[in-house]
Amino acid sequence: MLRSFRDAGRLLYAARVLARHDALIPREFAQSVPPQLRLVRAVLGRGRKADRNVAPGVRLALALESLGPAYIKLGQVLATRPDIIGDETAAALSILQDRLPPFPTDVAKREVESVLAAPLADLFATFDEPFAAASVAQVHRATTLDETPRAVAVKILRPGIEAQFARDLSAFAFAARWAERFAAEARRLRVRDVVNTLAASVALELDLRMEAAAASELAECTARDTQFRVPAVDWSRTAARVLTTEWIEGISLRSAAELEAAGHDPEAVALLVVRQFLSQALRDGFFHADMHQGNLFIDAEGRLVCVDFGIMGRLDTGMRRFMAETLSGFLARDYLRVADVHYEAGFVPRRHPAPLFAQALRAIGEPVFGQPASNVSMARLLQQLFDTTRRFDMELQPQLVLLQKTMVVVEGVARALDPDIDIWEAARPVVENWMIEQIGPEARLRDAAEGLNALGRLAREFPHLLHNAEIVSAMLADGGLRLHPDTAFQIAQAQVSRTRHVRVALWIAAGALVVLAVGML
């Protein structure tokens, strides 16, 4: 009971802050809400006059920033749910600024010593003042004590941040439970799932070993990319609350003029940013999902370098194929094929006629062609695609929404460097190469070879299979099959790990067995 009162109190405070920003029940919607909510708006306040000329979504973003870390993260999660908050608000929340004043360096030093269980003097030769500070952590530049000293970036969680998140997440869960209890719309939108998603995301972000692992994985995925690199992780100085990585000396992508002054071509850098992001998403299925200018640098060798791996996106093989074929279909203006891709993936119910769906897709794609490159946005096209598919009963795909939101940021970075960049032409070679590798002739031969190899293994095992068949027949005659527990466990493991190609091979094998059985009759 006491916890419920605390949760309610925190929510009331948040409601007052939102009201002061005219973001709780914005004036633009005040006349369309029930009288009870208009009364709530009157009691809590109608917003400051300074916010009058600011869009509702932007006012909401400002309010969430002022409420602190948990609300900033909530805004970032809501940015991936336009079905709940609308497209314009989602777009406004996608650019939430995650910046707070730093905590004292002395506190940071004590935190490092406590977490790494060693005096700071035994860990680092130098330890500078904060270089950057966000809601969850801050970064310091330091120098190691190695025989050849190395400059490193030391990221440290804010003291007490776990408890602060726990309090706010408890309040969010309390609000979600009550909302779903009394509002059918809240149940339909599954707001408790939103809170659970936020809680899971925060749990990962508050363990800096997970961020270190993400950096390590991305480095492995992109090891062959000569124009891109990831800072190396210093695992000996990394723990749950402290992350140490290689320090990056480079030029931020915030200024095209600075890049040009250093001898780099801003247009080439813009192209590199777009293609690197799409390569990560389509080729690797693992991409940096926070590619704003502050996290991107060009080093002395002209390579693009990413930092801050707290937000990463994943696309499974099926989703990557869906995205590649969708983009390829739009590039070829083959809207019926794009429609078929949606049906094949099971995203759009078959009850909707394919020609009608293709017509809706044409309405998205055709306005793009013939436009100046500066007017063509892949992120905007993807957003229009998601809006259209929702009208055809396509459920929200969180993987794709995060991809689209990241694409918005990537396009913004690229256009700041090259306002005339042709995003489609930048994307074309990445999409086409992935298509050739995955569904071209070589890929089909590779799939066929895997199936034939599996069938060959089956032929070699066939005498053993016949022997097992005799045993199974005898067991069936004796009252049924009996599996040893270890055998059942191994079957379950095999079922979980079986790949698509093995399933194809098993179907081929089953067909071969049927033919053989018929031949023996």
Image: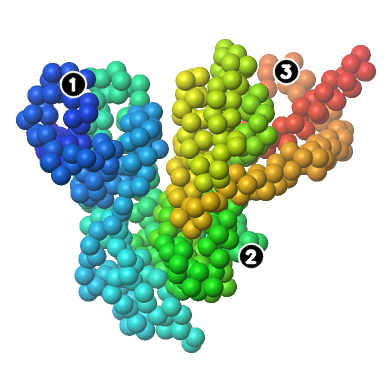
Question: Which quadrant of the figure contains the N terminus?
Answer: top left
- Position of residue 345 relative to residue 453, above or below, is above
Q: Helix or strand or loop: what does disc 3 sit on?
A: helix
Kindly identify which numbered label has been placed on residue 476.
3
Report the side of 357 relative to 22 (left or right): right
Q: CA distance from mark 1 to mark 3?
A: 72 Å
Q: Please give the residue where the numbered disc 2 appears in the rendered image.
A: 226
Crowd band around label 2 with a 10 angstrom C-alpha radius: few (<14), some (14–19), many (20+): few
Residue 134 can be seen in this image = yes
Which amino acid type corresponds to the residue marked 2 in the rendered image?
Answer: Thr
Which amino acid type corresponds to the residue marked 3 in the rendered image?
Answer: Leu
Report the side of 219 relative to 224 (left or right): left
**Residue at the far bottom in the pictured view:** 147
Report the side of 216 relative to 440 (left or right): left
Question: Which quadrant of the figure contains the C terminus?
Answer: top right
**Given this view, does label 1 or label 3 mark the residue nearer the observer?**
1
Q: Please name the residue shown 60% across and 56% down the image.
A: 221
Q: Please give the residue where the numbered disc 1 appears in the rendered image.
A: 31
Q: Nearer the viewer, residue 375 or 246?
A: 375
Q: Please name the residue shown 26% across and 70% down the image.
A: 108
Q: Please name the residue shown 28% across and 57% down the image.
A: 99
Q: Helix or strand or loop: what does disc 1 sit on?
A: helix
Query: Of the residues under marks 1 and 3, which one precedes in the sequence?
Result: 1
Query: Of the residues under marks 2 and 1, which one precedes in the sequence?
Result: 1
Residue 71 can be seen in this image = no
In percent of width and height, residue 326 lies at 61, 34
- Position of residue 260 relative to residue 370, above or below, is below
Which amino acid type corresponds to the residue marked 1 in the rendered image?
Answer: Gln
Crowd band around label 1 with a 10 angstrom C-alpha radius: few (<14), some (14–19), many (20+): few
